[in-house]
Amino acid sequence: MTATTEQDQESRRPSDAFHVFDTTLRDGAQREGINLSVADKLAIARHLDDFGVGFIEGGWPGANPRDTEFFARAREEIAFRHARLVAFGSTRRAGTPVEEDAQVRGLLDSQAPVITLVAKSHDRHVELALRTTLEENLAMIRDTVAYLTSHGRRVFVDCEHFFDGYAANAEYALDVVRTAAGAGADVVVLCDTNGGMLPARVQAVVRTVLADTGARLGIHAQDDSGCAVANTLAAVDGGATHVQCTANGYGERVGNANLFPVVAALELKYGKRVLPEGALREMTRVSHAIAEVVNLPPATHQPYVGVSAFAHKGGLHASAIKVDPDLYQHIDPEQVGNSMRMLVSDMAGRASVELKGRELGFDLEGDRELVGRIVARVKEQELKGFTYEAADASFELLLRDELEGGPRRFFRLESWRTITDQRADGGMENEATVRLWAKGERVLATGEGNGPVDALDRALRSALEQTFPELARLQLVDYKVRILEGTHGTQSTTRVLISTSDGTTEWSTVGVASNVIAASWQALDDAYTYGLLRAGLRPKESPAESPARQPAGPAA
Amino acid sequence: MTATTEQDQESRRPSDAFHVFDTTLRDGAQREGINLSVADKLAIARHLDDFGVGFIEGGWPGANPRDTEFFARAREEIAFRHARLVAFGSTRRAGTPVEEDAQVRGLLDSQAPVITLVAKSHDRHVELALRTTLEENLAMIRDTVAYLTSHGRRVFVDCEHFFDGYAANAEYALDVVRTAAGAGADVVVLCDTNGGMLPARVQAVVRTVLADTGARLGIHAQDDSGCAVANTLAAVDGGATHVQCTANGYGERVGNANLFPVVAALELKYGKRVLPEGALREMTRVSHAIAEVVNLPPATHQPYVGVSAFAHKGGLHASAIKVDPDLYQHIDPEQVGNSMRMLVSDMAGRASVELKGRELGFDLEGDRELVGRIVARVKEQELKGFTYEAADASFELLLRDELEGGPRRFFRLESWRTITDQRADGGMENEATVRLWAKGERVLATGEGNGPVDALDRALRSALEQTFPELARLQLVDYKVRILEGTHGTQSTTRVLISTSDGTTEWSTVGVASNVIAASWQALDDAYTYGLLRAGLRPKESPAESPARQPAGPAA
C-alpha cells in the first residue's frame, strides 16, 4: 500500500473523538444459535466496514484456530475503508511475566493494530474466578497494557463486571480504571457484564468515575434488563465517548446493546455525527444482510430496521397518517433506509424498486407503469418465499425480464435427474443428468459430485462449457438453505441462496421450490445466466424460443 | 356474588398505590401478525389476572363487535381475582353533547368499572387530526371525564403524543393534564405514542409535569427507540405511579413497553411489591402461554423469560459459573421461573460439559477422564461442523455413547438411495429406497415425497414402523440447512438441524456431511433414536453387532 492511499484511508476514517466499536464477531458470536465460519466473519466485517463503524472486534486470536485464521485472512483480504480491526484477549496470567505469556503473544501475532484487553474490576471475581490477589490483578493489567503499547498497539481495557464491582468495592474498581489508564490504555470500558443495570445508575456511575479518574471511558452493556440501548445512551449522557455494540443486538444470553438503535439515536436524536455521511440510510439493508450471513431471520420488530418498525395497523393511526406521516412516526423511515407500510402486505414499494433499479444502473423513475409491474412481480414472488434483499442478481434478472419484454436466457432446460446412493460398503455416489438446449443444440450431460446439487452443477457446467467457455471462471462460494413455513395451509417450501464469484465480483441468486434440489436448480440457473451477462454475453434466443424462465416444478 | 367473596376479592387486589396496567388486549393486538378472537382475548385475560396485574384493558367496546362481545363475556365468564377490567375509548366528538355521543354510551354499556379515555394533548394533532380548536378539545376532555365519573366509573386519561406535544407547546399539554385531573380523572397517563423518547427526557418531563400539576401520573411508552422499558422505569423515577405495558411487548409498529422486564425490574431492582406474592416465579410460564395464545413463537432472547435469557456459551463464563452462578447472572433465574442452561460449543470446556450433563440428569463430575473424552469428542465433532448447542438430543446421544461404552442403536443402516427427477413435462418425482437391519431382520422399503429428504424420511418410517410403532407419533417440525465453508482446503460441508416432536416435547438433532441428503440422514437417525429412547425403549443390539454409529460417508 502506498503512502497516498494510506492517507486517503485516514481521511475516510471516523473521527477519533467518538468511537463506534462493534463486537458482533466476538461477543455477538456468543448468541445461542450463531456459529460463524471464517467466511461468515469476513462477510460481516465487510458489511460493518461499509456501514462505517470505527472499530471491529474480530475475536480472540490464539484462543481458537478460527479466530486466528480470521485475523490472518482479514489482513490479506479486506481493504478496510472506515474501521480498524481489533483483537480481543485477556491480561497476562497471574504469576507469569507478560513477555512469556503465550496468550498475550497471540494478540501481538494477530497484527491487529488495536487490542481490547478484558480485565477483572470486581474484587469478588478476582478472588473467586481469577483466584489471585487484588494487587496481582492490578499488576497484570499494568504489565499487559504497558507491554502491548510498547509494541505499538493501541489498547482499550474492558473492565468486566464494572458496575457490580463498583457497587461492591468502589475504591478497587476505581483503582482498576486508574491503573489501566495510567499504563497507557486509550479507553477504559465500563462493562455491565451481567446486564442487570438500569440507565439512571449507569449514568451516575459513569459521571462519578469520569470525575474521579479523568480516564476516557467507554460503555459495554448487555441486555438482560431489556435496557442495553438506554444504558449505552445513559453512559454517553454521563460522559462516555466509546460505545460497544453488536449488530442486531446479538450476544450472550439476551444479547448486547444493539448497534442500530444506538447509532440512530446518537445521529438523529443527539445530533452527533458518528457514522460516515449517508451510512444511516443503509442501516436497514446492513441489518438484514448480517442476519442473512448468520442465518437468522431478521427480527421483524426490531427498532428502526424491522420490517414492522414503520408498519401501521391501527385505524386511528392510518387516517392520521393520510394527513401527515409525521403524526405517528418518530423519524422519517427513509433516514434509516426503512419504509412506511400501511397494509399487511409484505414488500417493498415503488420507491425501493426505483432505488434498487438506480443502484443497478437502470433509470426507472420515468416509467410508472413499468415500476408498477416490477413491484407487482416482486410481491408475487416474495409471497412464494423469494427474497430479493439477499439476491441482487436474481432481482436484476427479474428487472431485465420486465424491462426487455420477457425472459431472455442463454439456455433452456428440458429435464434433469439426480441420484444419491449411500452404498452398503459405506461409499457414496451422487450422479446428475441434465438435458438442455443451447444455441439451438440439444445437449445431454452427466456429472458426479459430493452431493446432488454439486453433481447437478457439474452436469450443467459440462453441458454448457463448450458453448460458453466463460463459465469456467465462475465458482460457487456460498450456499444457504432455509425452510420456510407454509402459509394458508400449504406445504413448507425451501429457499436456496447461492453466492457465485467470477474472481472479481460476487453475486447472489435465489430459488424457491418444494424441495432443495429444485430450488438449487433455480438459483444455479440465475447464477450462471447472470455470470454470462456479466461476462458481456447477450442471449441470442428470443423470448419465444425460450419460454420457461424456470423449470415448471410443482411448487416453484 | 356474595358480599363475603367480594370482600375476599378486595383483599387480594393489588394495592392502589401503584398500578400495573396491561393493554395487551388493546394496544398489543395492534402488532402486525396478531389477530385475536374473543376466545383468545378471554384466555389472555385469565393469564394476566392469574399473574396479578391490577388492570386489564380489554379493547374498545362499541368500536368493533369483537370487543363488545369480549366485555360481555368477560363479565360473565371470568371471576377476576386480581385485575379490574378496563374499557378504552375516546373523548366525545367535537360539537356533540357528551350524553348524546354513541361512542361514550358504548363505554358505559360495556359495564367496565374503569375507563381509559384517549385525549389529544399535542396542539398540532388537535388541529390536523381532530380538526377542532384547542378550547373545544379541553371541553371534550372535561365533559367526558365528568360524565363517566358521574356514572360511577373510574377514569384514566391517556394523553396521546404527550411528550411531543409538551416539546411543541408545553403550556397546552399541561392544560390538558390539569383539565383531565380537575374533571375527576384518577390518573393522567403521559403517552410516548410515537415511541421516539429517551429515558432522560421522559424522567425530566414527568418530574416537571408532576410538580406543575400535582396530578397522579402514568406512563405509556412505545418502543420505537428500543427504550420503552427504560422509559417506563424513568417515568417511575420521575414520580409516575401507573405503568401501561403489554405482555411480551406486543404492540403497534415495534411494540410497547414489555410488561415482564418492567415488573421484574420494579420488584427485583426497585424492591417495590407490584404483583401478588409468588407471581414473578410464574412469569416465564405466563409469557410463553400468552405467546402460544397469540400464535407467535415465544421470543427466545427476551429478557428474563426467553429460553436463552440464562443460556451461557463462553468458556470463560462456564468455568466461572461452576464456581458461582451469580458471577454471570444478574438475578437467580428461578426468581422469574426460568432456568440456567449451558450451551455446549467449541468455545466451551469441561465446565460446560459437566453442567450440561447435570442438566440432562448425568453426574459427570467424579470422572475427569470421561469428561475429558466428551470434551475432546465435542471439539472434534464441532470442527467437522456439528453444533451441539442447537442439538441437545444429538449431544445426549454422544454423551450416552461415551458413558455406556459405544454406540447402541435401534437399527443399523445398510444402504439408501434417492432419485429426484425433473421431467421434461415439468412434473417432478422424488423416490428413496432404504435397506436396514432392525431386531435382526433385514428390511427394504421405498418412499416418495416432496423432496429427496422427505422421501428418505418416508422410506425410513416405512421400514421401521412395524418393528417400532412408537415412531408413528414422531413428527418433523423444523428442518434447517446450512452450508459450511471448508477450512484448510477441505471441501465445504453441509449441516442439517432437525427438530422433532412427539406431541409433548421437542428435540433437535444435527447431521454433517458433504451433501445435504447424507447430513439429513444422520440428523434423522439421531432424531428417531432419541425419540425411541424417550418413548422408554432400550436398544437390544450391542455395540459389536452395530459397529457404525453413522453411515461411514466420505465426509461425515
Image: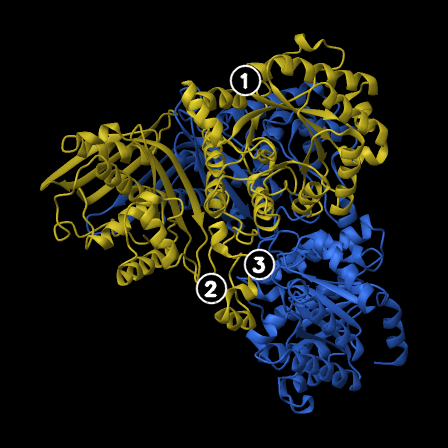
Chain colours: A yellow, B blue
Q: Residue at x 28, y 55 (%)?
A: A364
Q: Which type of secondary structure does the marked residue at label 1 adopt?
A: loop
Spot the residue most to the left.
A440
Name the amino acid, label 2: Val
**Circle nearer the viewer, 3 or 2:** 3
Q: Residues within 10 Å of mark 2 (few under 14, many from 20)?
A: few
The answer for which chain carries disc 2 is A
Q: Which mark is residue A233?
A: none
Give left or right: position of A315 versus B89.
left
Establish if A427 lies above or below B275. Answer: above
The percent coordinates of residue B269 (x first, y second) are: 81, 48
The amino acid at mark 1 is Ser
Mark 1 and mark 3 lie on one chain; the one further toward the N terminus is 1
Q: Alpha-carbon neighbours of circle 3 within 10 Å: few (<14), some, or many (≥20)?
A: some
Residue B355 position (above or below residue B76): above
Q: Which residue is mark 2?
A: A344
Instruction: Provide the secondary structure element on which disc 2 rests.
Output: loop
Kindly tell me whether residue B439 is visible in this rendering.
Answer: no
Q: Which badge, 2 or 1, comes first in the chain's sequence?
A: 1
User: Is B282 on the left-hand or right-hand side of B344?
Assistant: right
For label 3, the residue is: A330
Q: Numbered disc 3: what chain?
A: A
Q: Which of the pair B242/A514 is nearer the observer?
A: B242
Circle nearer the viewer, 1 or 3 = 3
Q: Quick one: label 1, few (<14), some, or many (20+) residues within 10 Å? A: many
Query: Could you tell me which secondary element the residue under label 3 belongs to?
Result: loop
Using the image, tell me which numbered label, if any, was put on residue A110: 1
- The chain letter for the residue carrying disc 1 is A
